[in-house]
């Protein structure tokens, strides 16, 4: 079994510096299962339907309509396509949605298909399938192999899972988890991941089924064999280069069966299951934040918020094609609304790179890192150069069980679940949102023990820019397709004039207060919600805080907002100072010694510092960089206090 560092090879340079791609978002509804039919007196009513779908229409857009048979609540969302309860809907999804992505892989583009949905909604059935009904993984492998066989190209697979934010090889059990790192070109590497050549479908079945056996599954109250990890099949292809030098250009297709998002109130999870569920929900939340950021051209794409999104960094956004299959259980209204609303929000992903800043940042990062490493090495083995080298070494192994979530967090969460059950309303939700923003703003202010991720994550946006600029626009979509840029990026409810009764119902649904467009929740080291994918917001804080921060315009609300702005100003001033100060001036700052001053002077020669995270290029950890700033800021306040006492 071949074991090597698995990475996305360098993409051909783009002729068009502005590369745009989108995630197509489709809905797949599984049929009612026999026991569900019998429990509904043989007359189950699906909670989801579609209005006016025309596969032949160029517009290729559908209105997905959700109605709760019990309460008559309704919702409506626009998505790219809808596959109803027919038996062979996976085959249809493959031929209409996945097979058009495959030719691009032979041209060096990446593509990703992921199944998202609640536990038991049919994700594994869709991706992995059964012997009788092959899933998208098998169908894709088959098509890729037939192209390889007719063109002399080669294919190989890797298969791994991300469990509790750790990556494990499913084809070759190893002592160590797979470490993830990105090189100076912004390419993602999974060090030590097996890559097995596949020549025939029989090879594939042998290798794949052994991997499937290793997948971690466990019993929960909702689905007998519920997958507790995200599982990724990577099919890579190589092809001789056009210039005949023998170098190969690679493309890869990631097929991802995401773990099901869970509502722990329903699963009654506890112990390790609760921890697993927290990690699952957290990483799905991170994925939704990444998609949201891409969707809305946000300057910061938080790829580093979870292992999953970090791994997908080179396959989500840029010119990588992506398809999200939102899987629905037709008997679960609330779950379906939750899944479809996230899917609708994710619908149009466009990784547009309009500003000079975005295009410059990655280059600066790459050049600075390379130069710094060379410079450090030229001065002998310094502590800093060892730190840089350590970045490339595998992470020491920890078993999944060694990952813990603080008991305090679980207790708070459980307590709040109980309160949430008693009936949560919109005001309460608003209050929760306010409480969250308050906590983040206040917690970030000069918190030297718990540095905000903001400083680190600004840099990630640069990484995104590297990918965008390096990637090639796929060639095989010539007509105006849904992959092309669309200025009307929106997951808004339907608002057109509708006449029929069902259309009126849809209009009502669109106006329903429940149908508020989702907005991304802020996530930081201070606040990592375990239950972001649960159906009801559940963060309930102590009653003392409730009254104070109910509205943003309270004195405390204003203070927390302004203090956050003040911190940003101070950080900017500090960076400006580091960029402009003389050696002597640098030495006057607390925490900056001779060596540090020398590093900073050398670092900024190449390019000015843009954020505190740039200080990591000289070997500081994000915490050290933050502490450096905190010392300077505290010093400032101490000086002011002394001044006022003296005057
Ligand atoms: N088209 C279909 N025809 C028949 N059964 C189906 C179909 N789709 C899904 N199922 C069945 O529905 C059940 C749940 O599906 P599956 O295990 O794929 O859900 P899941 O979303 O992967 O759940 P989890 O996240 O817990 O792993 C399984 O018994 C599966 O066989």
Image: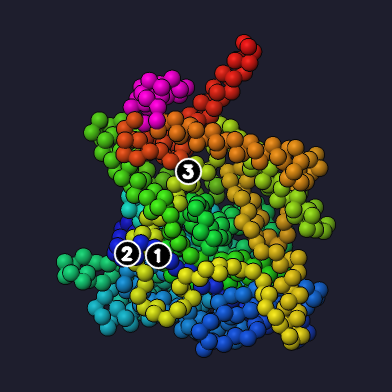
Mark 2 CB near ligand 1 (8 Å cut): no
Residue drawn at x 32%, y 69% as measured from the top left: 108
Residue occupied by mark 1: 19
Assign the magenta stretch its main secondary structure: helix
Q: Which residues are magenta?
A: 580-600
Q: Disc 2, disc 1: CB below 8 Å?
A: yes
Check residue 456 in the rendering and tell me which mark sits there, or answer none: 3
Residue occupied by mark 2: 14
Lower position in the chain sequence, tag 2 or tag 1: 2
In the image, taking residue 424 as reference, residue 636 lies left or right, namely: left
Residue drawn at x 54%, y 22% as measured from the top left: 635
Query: Residue 186: where, in percent of width, then height?
Result: 36, 53
For mark 1, give the secondary structure: loop
Query: Residue 585: where, in percent of width, then height?
Result: 41, 22
Query: Residue 516: where, in percent of width, then height?
Result: 70, 64
Q: Is residue 593 magenta?
A: yes
Q: Could you tell me how far apart the alpha carbons at marks 2 and 3 are, in whole angstroms?
A: 28 Å
Q: Disc 2, disc 3: CB below 8 Å?
A: no
Lower position in the chain sequence, tag 2 or tag 3: 2
């Amino acid at each position: 079994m071949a074991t090597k560092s698995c990475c996305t090879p360098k993409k051909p340079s783009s002729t068009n510096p502005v590369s745009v791609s989108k995630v197509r978002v489709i809905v797949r509804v599984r049929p009612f299962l026999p026991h569900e039919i019998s429990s509904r007196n043989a007359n189950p009513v699906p909670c989801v339907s579609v209005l006016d779908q025309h596969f032949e229409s160029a517009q290729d857009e559908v209105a997905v309509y959700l109605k709760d048979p019990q309460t008559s609540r309704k919702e409506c969302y626009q998505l790219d396509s809808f596959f109803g309860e027919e038996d062979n809907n996976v085959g249809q999804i493959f031929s209409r949605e996945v097979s058009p992505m495959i030719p691009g892989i032979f041209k060096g583009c990446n593509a990703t298909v992921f199944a998202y949905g609640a536990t038991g909604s049919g994700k594994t059935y869709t991706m992995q399938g059964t012997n009788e009904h092959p899933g998208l993984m098998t169908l894709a492998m088959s098509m890729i192999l037939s192209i390889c066989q007719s063109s002399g190209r080669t294919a190989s697979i890797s298969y791994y899972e991300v469990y509790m934010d750790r990556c494990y090889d499913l084809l070759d059990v190893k002592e160590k988890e797979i470490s993830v790192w990105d090189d100076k070109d912004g390419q993602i590497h999974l060090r030590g991941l097996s890559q097995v050549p596949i020549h025939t479908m029989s090879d594939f079945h042998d290798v794949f089924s052994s991997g499937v056996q290793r997948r971690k599954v466990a019993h929960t109250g909702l689905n007998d064999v519920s997958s507790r990890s995200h599982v990724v099949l990577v099919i890579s292809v190589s092809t001789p280069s056009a210039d005949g030098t023998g170098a190969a250009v690679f493309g890869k297709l990631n097929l991802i069966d995401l773990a099901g998002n869970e509502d722990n109130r329903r699963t009654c999870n506890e112990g390790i299951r609760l921890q697993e569920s927290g990690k699952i929900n957290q990483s799905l939340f991170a994925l939704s934040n990444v998609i949201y950021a891409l969707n809305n051209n946000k300057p910061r794409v938080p790829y580093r918020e979870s292992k999953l999104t970090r791994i997908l960094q080179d396959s989500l956004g840029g010119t990588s094609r992506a398809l999200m299959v939102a899987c629905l259980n037709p008997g679960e209204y609330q779950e379906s609304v939750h899944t479809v609303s996230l899917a609708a929000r994710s619908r149009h992903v466009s990784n547009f790179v309009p500003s000079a800043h975005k295009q410059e940042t990655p280059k600066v990062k790459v050049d600075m890192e390379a130069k710094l490493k060379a410079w450090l090495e030229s001065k002998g083995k310094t502590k800093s150069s060892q730190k840089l080298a350590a970045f490339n070494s595998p992470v020491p192994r920890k078993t999944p069980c060694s990952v813990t979530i603080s008991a305090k967090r679980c207790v708070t969460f459980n307590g709040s679940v109980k309160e949430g059950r008693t009936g949560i309303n919109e005001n309460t939700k608003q209050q929760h949102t306010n409480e969250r923003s308050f906590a983040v703003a206040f917690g970030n202010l000069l918190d030297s023990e718990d540095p905000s991720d903001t400083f680190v994550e600004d840099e990630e946006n640069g990484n995104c820019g590297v990918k965008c600029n390096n990637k090639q626009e796929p060639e095989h979509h010539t007509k105006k397709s849904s992959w092309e840029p669309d200025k009307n990026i929106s997951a808004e409810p339907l608002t057109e004039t509708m006449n029929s009764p069902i259309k009126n119902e849809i209009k009502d649904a669109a106006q329903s207060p429940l149908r508020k467009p989702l907005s991304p929740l802020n996530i930081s080291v201070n606040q990592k919600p375990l239950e972001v994918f649960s159906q009801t917001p559940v963060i309930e804080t102590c009653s003392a805080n409730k009254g104070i921060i109910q509205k943003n315009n309270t004195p405390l609300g204003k203070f927390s907002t302004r203090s956050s702005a003040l911190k940003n100003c101070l950080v900017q001033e500090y960076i400006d100072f580091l960029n402009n100060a003389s050696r002597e001036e640098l030495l006057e700052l607390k925490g900056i010694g001779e060596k540090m001053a020398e590093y900073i002077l050398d670092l900024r020669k190449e390019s000015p510092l843009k954020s505190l995270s740039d200080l990591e290029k000289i070997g500081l950890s994000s915490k050290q960089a933050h502490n450096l700033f905190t010392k300077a800021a505290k010093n400032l306040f101490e000086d002011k206090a002394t001044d006022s006492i003296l005057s």
